[in-house]
Image (cartoon, helix red, strand yellow):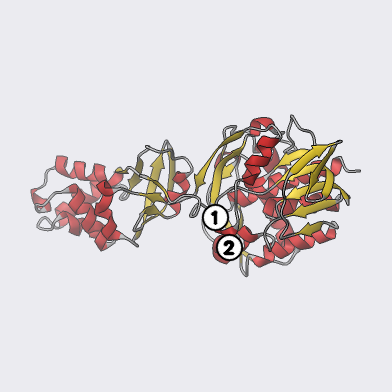
Amino acid sequence: MHYDAIILGAGGAGLLAAATAGQAGATVLVLDHADRAGKKILISGGGRCNFTNLGIEPQCYLSENPHFAKSALSRYTQWDFLALVEAHGIAWHEKTLGQLFCDGSAKQIVRMLLDECARGGVDIRLSTTLGDIRHADGLFHVAGHSARQLVIATGGPSIPKMGATGRAYDIARDFGLGVVAPRPALVPFTLGAEDNLFTEVTGIATPATASVNGARFDEAVLFTHKGLSGPAILQVSSYWRPGDPVSLDILPEAASLLRDARRRMPRAHLKAALAEHLPNRLAEALARRIGLATELGNLSDTALDRAAATLTALTFHPTGTEGYAKAEVTAGGIDTAGLSSKTMEATSCPGLYAIGEAVDVTGWLGGYNFQWAWSSGAACGQAIAARKG
């Protein structure tokens, strides 16, 4: 059968694009090698899907072109997707920092998208091997089907156990599009022997400000047997490059807090002062790293200030990250320089589109990447419908 569009990938971006185009009258086929639609949606948010964020803004996204996401995000907003969620009777709640989750299950979001596709008469075929993709006689040919328009919505290689691959980049290159070097993002760091002091605090989490290359996030940091994780670390990992140091402000206002502790308990040691504000094992590890073995009453202001400087700028040098296996998303991807920010269409290959995680647009942790999937999918779906028939 000949379609107006074939969409490669039955994830969030692909399904939203398909539903949008289908309901506007386009004939759409969605192909995916997976045996279920929306596999990444199903595991997201602990199974409850952090489907968007109330604080969506363009500056919450990374890209070689930081302006690229503005158009799509402004034309299909978090409020638009939330209205769709509510129209389907899906109960939701705000967790923290504007993050919206289903009260029930992520399955509700997948079912909603599939119902929307059904309303548009979308044909979805799973467990399908894509094989070679050709463009001839004005048509794209995939797995025995043809269409005037083709959408790359196969995501990135993050979470390979779900079947994720870098196929999107191969397809893009085949049609002359550039690819910004992909890398794991929203991913834990690994630490080397020089930071082994902190292996004994495995499992401890504490609020902190994590900083990398000028990016700062105030959330929890988790010490793991491999290195550093937790929301603040995942956030800054998207801005990290090999060799960059990571700084943690573990105890804001440490200087005044330590002076106060010296006044109140001059015979106590640094560990006791830190344990008033931090988990005990972490306080002990930090006290050893700082190395002040005498009583607080014997420490000068200068010594306390040096200790405070360590606590407010605790520096680590990651040896790397835990890679795509633990990365929530992929940074980099299909170069936006070759795409229209309004339609997501390739400027050098009319009828070819790229959306969602496959594109060099990466959001913060907390529903931002799903919103990019919805917004880029909606922009693409509208463009497909405008060229139907």
What separation in Å lies between label 1 and label 2 (alpha carbons)?
11 Å
Residue shown at 88%/52% (left/top)? 1
Secondary structure of the residue carrying numbered label 1? loop
* Percent coordinates x, y for residue 329 in the rendering: 55, 49
Is 24 located above or below residue 212 in the figure? below
Marks 1 & 2, CB-CB < 8 Å contact: yes
Q: Nearer the viewer, mark 1 or mark 2?
A: 1
Q: Where is residue 106 in the image (x, y as percent from the top left)?
A: 63, 65
Which amino acid, by three-letter code, is at mark 2? Ile
Tell which of 284 and 38 is nearer to you.
38
Q: Where is residue 138 in the image (x, y as percent from the top left)?
A: 85, 36
Front-most of residues 103 and 186: 186
**Count of all numbered marks drawn on residues in the image:** 2
Which image quadrant for residue 221? bottom left
Secondary-structure class at tag 2: helix
Residue on which disc 2 sits: 43
Q: Which mark is residue 159?
A: 1
Local crowd size for mark 1, using a 10 Å CA cut-off: few (<14), some (14–19), many (≥20) = some
Examine the rendering and report whether any part of residue 80 can be seen: no
Looking at the picture, which amino acid does disc 1 mark? Answer: Ile
**Residue occupying image coordinates x 60% and y 61%:** 49
